[in-house]
Image (cartoon, grey):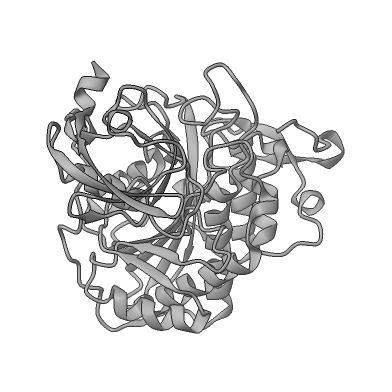
Amino acid sequence: MPTTAPRLSLAVVCVLMGSSLALAQTCPAPSAIAKGLTLPLAAVRYLADDALAGRLAGSAGERCAGDYIAGEFRRLGLRPAGAAGTFFQDVPLASVLNPHAAGGTGRNVMAALDGANAALKGEWIVVGAHYDHLGEGGSPSSLAPGDRAIHNGADDNASGVAAMLEVAERLVAAARPSRSVLFIAFTGEETGLLGSAHFVANPTIGPGVMTAMINMDMVGRLAGGSLIVSGVDTADEWRALLDPAAARAGVTLAMRGEGYGPSDHSSFYVKDVPVLHFFTNTHGDYHKPSDDWEKIDGPGLEKVAAIVTEVVSAAARRPARLTLRRGAGQPPPPPGAPSPASSSAYLGSVPDFTPVDRGVKLSGVTPGSPADQAGLRTGDVVLGIGTHDVADLQAMTDALRAYKPGETVALRFLRGTETRTIQVTLGSRAAIAR
């Protein structure tokens, strides 16, 4: 998207606090960009403005976004919970595991709502969302190599940050819960969960114990559809807390058990913290310059925030901690170990990301791949692989992980209105990498 928003007339000088750089920086004024809007949509509008240039981790736009979030925490009367009494925690952005990591330093932004019960206030529930995005593209965006355009990331993940701020506003307005609640906007998620991994290795809550983590990543496209909630098998009590909250909000939940996934909650579950991940599904604007604020479902975003608020409040007020359940899903490999994807079965399908009623729609297939050789083509919708139903992209990933390269499986798909079944001999990702 061309940069059309006026810059200088909206500028104010924001003094960056809590950073080792301690620089003064010109940032756009929230009151001008989000004029006439209130939370949560106001936060999406500001964070997804062209003036923030896509919020690449460690960039000037990311720092303006961090200042905005800290300003909202301050407005709500939350206590700074970062380093040295600030709202910020510096995060090194270099990554030996991800060659696309930007390097330099980013910032987690965090604030606390201290619990009212002296015996329980040292037990923390973390409510988080990442606020970095892709800047002007590059890997892993949809643009061709060398092309550049501002990726505003309204759904990914200004929507999650906006919902987090709405949850904070609702909890502040209610009676204080027994346990403490920590709100964190993470940096570096797009380049390998760097901010959340840094926090769990360097928590700022002193001797406190994290008893749950709720993550919101891409929650801005509900539009009457189902709200996907992963991690429900990481604690015995999650389903009982979710069902009444969703019913009161009038939202249908699509629950998934696994506690691991490609977002910040995974950093917590590997440390034995029960987690939930809220997600309104992928779409055709995913990691594209077209992921803009006008496409966000404001009323749906408020429903997501209402559900999360009720679940957080219930978990924070119950007499006993949530009961951790380990082993919900496949953990990521340890640092330095080969990725499971490198040895998992390979199909060669290219997802469209356009929502469909069920399955995964294809935008194409890789020439010469198993999908190509079996006759799959653009527009087909994959419904099942072997004995596994494919309800969404994550289910398709799980299905492929269940098989080994060289195995022949039945693949069910929809072409037009006709359901078909073909036999596919799966390939090897490791072979592709060579």
Q: Looking at the image, can residue 354 be seen?
A: yes
To which quarter of the image does residue 247 belong? bottom left
Q: How many marks?
A: 0
Q: Nearer the viewer, residue 10 or 231?
A: 231
Question: In which quarter of the view is residue 181 placed?
Answer: bottom left
| Whole-percent x, y for residue 359 in the image | 38, 53
* Residue 267 in view here: no
At 81% from the left edge and 57% from the top edge, which residue is drawn?
35
Residue at the extreme front:
418
Q: Along the line of sight, which residue is nearer the eye, 188 or 201?
A: 188
How far from the left and from the top, in percent, is residue 401?
20, 43
Farthest residue, direction right: 9
Give the image location of residue 36, x and y in percent: 81, 62
Quadrant of the frame with the N terminus? top right
Residue 378: image location, x then y, percent: 45, 37
Is residue 59 placed above or below 204 in the rendered structure? above
Residue 78 drawn above or below residue 57? below
The residue located at (41%, 42%) in the rendering is 195
Left or right of residue 364, residue 32 in this image? right
Q: Is residue 158 left or right of residue 422?
A: right
Q: Relative to the observer, which residue lies in front, 415 or 82?
A: 415
Specify whether 68 is left or right of 326.
right
Residue drawn 65% across the image and 32% down it? 150
Q: Quadrant of the C terminus?
A: top left
